[in-house]
Image (cartoon, grey):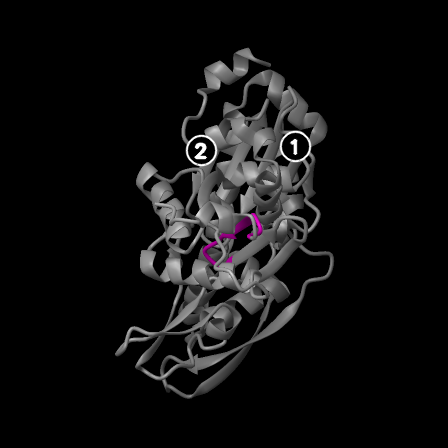
Amino acid sequence: MIRPLSALFGLFSRDLGIDLGTANTLVYVRGKGIVISEPSVVAVDKKTKRVLAVGVEAKAMVGKTPESIVAVRPLKDGVIADFDTVEVMLHYFIRKVHSQQLLTPHPRVVIGIPSGVTEVEKRAAKDAALSAGAREAYTIEEPMAAAIGAGLPINEPVGSMIVDIGGGTTEVAVISLGGIVVNRSIRVAGDEIDEAIVQWARRDHNLIIGERTAENAKIAAGSAYPLEEERRVVLRGRDVLTGLPKAVEVSSVEIREAIAGPVNQIIEAVRSCVEETPPELLADIMERGIVLAGGGALLMGLDKRLQAELRIPVYLADDPLTCVARGTGRVAEALHLYQRALQGTQQRRTPATSTSTT
């Protein structure tokens, strides 16, 4: 429910596009671009339930807090797992964007959500934004937002294919005439790749490492395809047997084998989407290529691996980390141009209907 004078206050608020991600939250402000990029983490005092920190400050506390303080990631696999904490996080980001204003902000907000979510999960995202102070809240499916952010011609009668690999989900979609024709959404992405490294280090090296160490190893030496020059990285953690500090030097070849499971699942999701794509749209994609977006797209050699497996050109979007945020922002700036894309979040056309329009 919009509070009295909310519409008036909206005149002094900045419309926002929000990529509410499992790992990171990015906020796009109308007319300014992306102004916030912070971890989706909230530090909470378990005894008092008081929020102590949000974003960068809270992420720095992960694994380093006293027992009474927990660093919470309130989104799991791209959807809200802790409504109250997400509301606090959104309220913090909305206030931060409007920090120079005296009036309470009531912006119009567009939120990117995974394409495989339920109506209940979709409603939770809208409700969290409204509870955090938004006067209007819209949702748009993340692959559509990523395609808009990557500059793909989503409203034209040609097939475009986007693969958005985030922290919690991988979204694959074929888009034409402003709608999603075929899509796949799997809850395997960057987090699962990190977890695979954690499990491998314990299993093969009797080494207990944290998720931040695993993520750093993935960035430094993780790959999906043989590198021209293989790399080495040192993992530091605790010995399973002795409990003492331990350091192990490993190669990018070993890490590639360690993360093969989740990487193969992502590739299979893309392959499945290609196999279901109508022939005319597939012809467009073979000519125009597949575009990779999201932080997971930065995994070294992933584009080469996909290209080798599918025999379709594969390209990395410009600044892939920000594609969803830029897409939600562009929609917030011009809602009237993207009505079809927004409607697609509630009612998607069937592949048969979409094919007949091409």
Residue extending farthest left: 47
Q: Measuring 50% from the left and 76% from the top, which residue is drawn there?
A: 60
Residue 16 is a magenta residue: yes
Residue 79 in view of the camera? no
Point out residue 313 in the picture as x, y percentages from the top left corner.
69, 35
Residue 336 in view of the camera? yes
| Figure check: 126 above or below 313 | below
Q: Nearer the viewer, residue 314 or 133?
A: 133
Residue 34 is a magenta residue: no
Calculate the distance from the C-alpha at mark 2 to the C-alpha at mark 1: 31 Å
Residue extending farthest right: 228
| Figure check: 287 above or below 102 | above
Q: Secondary structure at mark 2?
A: loop
Q: Of the two numbered discs 2 and 1 on the same chain, state the one appearing first in sequence.
A: 1
Left or right position of 312 against 105: right
Point out residue 281 in the picture as x, y percentages from the top left corner.
61, 21
Instruction: Residue type at mark 2: give it.
Output: Thr
Point out residue 342 in the picture as x, y percentages from the top left corner.
50, 32
Q: Quadrant of the C terminus?
A: top right
Q: Which residue is mark 1?
A: 311
Point out residue 178 in the picture as x, y percentages from the top left corner.
57, 26
Q: Residues within 10 Å of mark 1 (few under 14, many from 20)?
A: few
Residue range corresponding to the magenta coloring? 13-24
Q: Quadrant of the N terminus?
A: top left
Q: Which residue is mark 2?
A: 345
In the image, which disc is placed on residue 223? Answer: none
